[in-house]
Amino acid sequence: MEAYKRVALARKKTRPTGLDYIENLFTNFIELHGDRCFGDDPAMITGLGFLLDMPVTIIAQERGKNTKSRVKRNFGSSHPEGYRKALRQMKLAEKFNRPIVCIIDTSGAFCGIGAEERGQGHAIAQNLMEMMALKVPIVSIIIGEGGSGGALALGVADEVWMLENAIYSVISPEGCASILWKDSSKTKEAANCLKLTAQDLLELEVVDKIISENHRDFKLVYKELKINLYKTFKKRKVLPKEELTQLRYERFRKFGAIEEKELID
């Protein structure tokens, strides 16, 4: 399937959102609000729940399902308080030794004047720095559109998984086409060049696993995710804290590395 068709599927209005995954993967979910600094951000849902018998911290980006809820959730584009709220819950998870699940689905962080005035860039950078050193297991799952720093702010994990028809990119194909070629008709070409599909990113080792989709019944997706998450956290919880953070560090350090043999070839 060509890349831009994957983009269309990732943005499909009927696609399950973060709340759907929370309801189907976890039990006894309790939502926690606010960043204790400015306010609450409905585009970022955070809270506690159980993955089978395991207590976990859940952080999910939520786009909304209809016009009213999408406006309320700002179409999944978080303000700085959303990222600070997420970080507050991550630090609490570390304190109580709870694994963290991040569910990514955003076209990018909100780029309005208010968000910039309140430190959007700093909030995202703070998340990147702090997540690298958190001493609990983290798994990030890209369920739809993973766009720019808005997605990366929840993407510093021990493992990053993608749904089969999700996308993950530094910029949207439309934005890339307008910058590189000043031509919106080049959008499909830009999508191919960006290597934003799950298949491309698995080959580049940017993601670690592709979750297959069944469009008629997402219950199969939820079941696979629940089993894989539980097994992954069980395996990683027994690792020494220093080893856990070192493995996470090494995962990101190898991005873009070129072997000497490749360079010669």
Image (cartoon, rainbow, N blue to C red):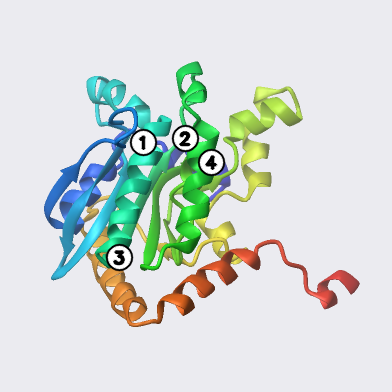
**Label 3 packing within 10 angstroms: few (<14), some (14-19), many (20+):** many
Residue at the top extreme, as displayed? 113
Q: Which residue is labeled 3 in the image? A: 99
**Label 1 packing within 10 angstroms: few (<14), some (14-19), many (20+):** many
The secondary structure type at the circle numbered 3 is: loop
Q: Nearer the viewer, mark 3 or mark 4?
A: 3
**Label 4 packing within 10 angstroms: few (<14), some (14-19), many (20+):** many
Instruction: Say which amino acid is labelled 1.
Output: Gly
Q: Nearer the viewer, mark 4 or mark 2?
A: 4
- Residue 61 spot, x, y in % from top left: 34, 41
From the viewer's side, name the closer residue of 162 and 160. Answer: 160
Number of marks in the rendered image: 4
Q: Nearer the viewer, mark 2 or mark 3?
A: 3
The C terminus, quarter of image: bottom right
Q: Which residue is labeled 4 in the image? A: 149
**Is mark 2 in CB contact (under 8 Å) with mark 3?**
no
Q: Which residue is labeled 1 in the image? A: 82
Residue at the right extreme, as displayed? 264
- The quadrant holding residue 25 is bottom left
